[in-house]
Each structure stands twice: as C-alpha cells, then as structure tokens.
C-alpha cells in the first residue's frame, strides 16, 4: 500500500454503511479510531468496544465467534492494531470459524500514536499475510460500494473472511464510546441473554 492510495474509502461512511447492512452482528472494535467510527455510526448494545487492548480485537472476536456460532461476529479494527495482534490470524485460520468477519481499516499509519507510517505503507500486504496464515477468503476494497458484498458474506457465515479497507489518512472528530469496561461487558452480555457477573 502506498502512503496515499489513489483511491480510498471514507472511513466513517464505510463503517456506517457496513453496520447498517449488518444490524444483528456482534461487533468487536479495535481500540482508538475503529471504536470511534463504530460509535459514530450509532451505539448498540451488541457493540463491544475495546480500550487499551492493543492487538486483542481479533482474539476476543474469535472466542466470541466460537461461543456464539449462530451469530455473525464482525471485527472492525485498524492496521496498526491488527499488526500488533497478527498472530491471532493464524489461530483463526486453524479454527476456521464460519461466522467471523475481520474488517481492517487501513490508512497506512499508527493513528493513535502520532500518525507514524505503519508497516502497511512500508510494504506489508495484510491480505497476503491473512492468506498465508490460511484465511482463504481475504481481499482488499477501497470504497463503500463493497459493503453489501461484505455484509452478505458475513450473514451467510461461509467461513472466516478478512477484508482490508483502504481508507484516507484523515482523522474525523472523535466520537467516544463508553469507557467503563464493566458497563460495556455487562451490556453486551445482556444483549446475548447472558447474566452479568
């Protein structure tokens, strides 16, 4: 990925369109901008926002997908956060959860630490990495036009899907979701019909 791709999706519009197409999905966010984008699209009880868990979104979502096989699980994270948890893709490939979709918003930068260039703008191909781990359904998109296709794959639950979304390296105004981890956890469990603990 070049530092400034010729074509890139608007992150907020993309996330909003995708969530609108998957109203019943269980959503796990990576920390920072991915959480802000999901929250800006509309807070939902089945959104699980991560704070201070760099690299943990796909691992958490894998556990959720295995525990809730009849529900579509959607991860929305950034390239920096996914790079931090890159090994989780190997476990996802080994387990092959049919109901897990990973969407990586890739602007080629570490947005939360000062917009330093990330590995994806220095030559790392996340789609090739995902395929190398064994996630066969891995591909890249650069516009909101693909949200319907991603939503269809997620709803059909045909196997793990990895989607790299090339986005602009802009920083929209922050929309901060709840930061109380216990509240987020209990609200999410309640949405699943599970008792809080």
Image (cartoon, helix red, strand yellow):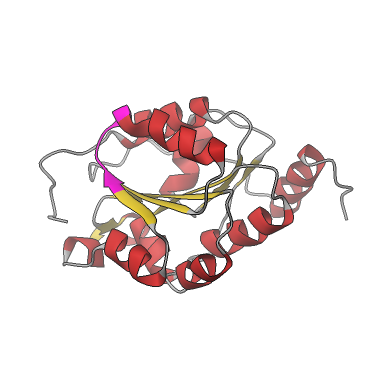
What quarter of the picture does the N terminus occupy? bottom left
- What is the span of residues highlighted in magenta in the rendered image? 140-145
Residue for point 24% across, 67% down: 119
> Image check: 197 left or right of 85?
right
> Image check: 160 left or right of 167?
right
Viewer can see residue 52: no
Residue for point 69% across, 53% down: 181
Above or below for 169 versus 111: above
Where residue 16 appears, as percent x and y from the top left, is: 44, 29
Above or below for 50 versus 93: above
Where residue 138 appears, as percent x and y from the top left, is: 36, 54
Above or below for 143 versus 171: above
User: Camera-side residue: 125 or 180?
Assistant: 125
Viewer can see residue 137: yes
What quarter of the picture does the C terminus occupy? bottom right
Where residue 96 appears, as percent x and y from the top left, is: 55, 61
Where residue 22 appears, as percent x and y from the top left, is: 54, 31
User: Camera-side residue: 173 or 190?
Assistant: 190
Q: Quadrant of residue 8?
A: top left
Is 81 included in the stretch rendered in magenta? no
User: Camera-side residue: 26 or 91?
Assistant: 91
Count of numbered tags = 0
Residue for point 24% across, 63% down: 125
């Amino acid at each position: 990925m070049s530092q400034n791709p010729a074509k890139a999706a608007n992150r907020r519009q993309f996330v909003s369109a995708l969530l609108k197409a998957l109203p019943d999905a269980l959503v796990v966010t990576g920390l920072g901008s991915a959480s802000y984008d999901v929250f800006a699209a509309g807070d939902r009880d089945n959104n699980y926002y991560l704070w201070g868990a760099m690299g943990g979104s796909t691992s958490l979502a894998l556990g959720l997908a295995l525990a809730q096989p009849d529900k579509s699980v959607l991860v929305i994270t950034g390239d920096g956060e996914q790079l931090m948890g890159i090994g989780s893709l190997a476990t996802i490939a080994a387990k092959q959860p049919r109901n897990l979709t990973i969407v990586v918003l890739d602007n080629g930068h570490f947005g939360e630490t000062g917009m330093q260039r990330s590995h994806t703008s220095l030559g790392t191909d996340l789609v090739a990495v995902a395929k190398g781990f064994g996630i066969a359904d891995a591909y890249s998109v650069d516009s909101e036009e693909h949200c319907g296709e991603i939503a269809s794959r997620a709803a059909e639950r045909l196997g793990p899907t990895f989607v790299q979304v090339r986005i602009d390296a802009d920083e929209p105004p922050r929309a901060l979701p709840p930061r109380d981890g216990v509240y987020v956890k209990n609200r999410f469990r309640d949405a699943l019909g599970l008792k809080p603990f």
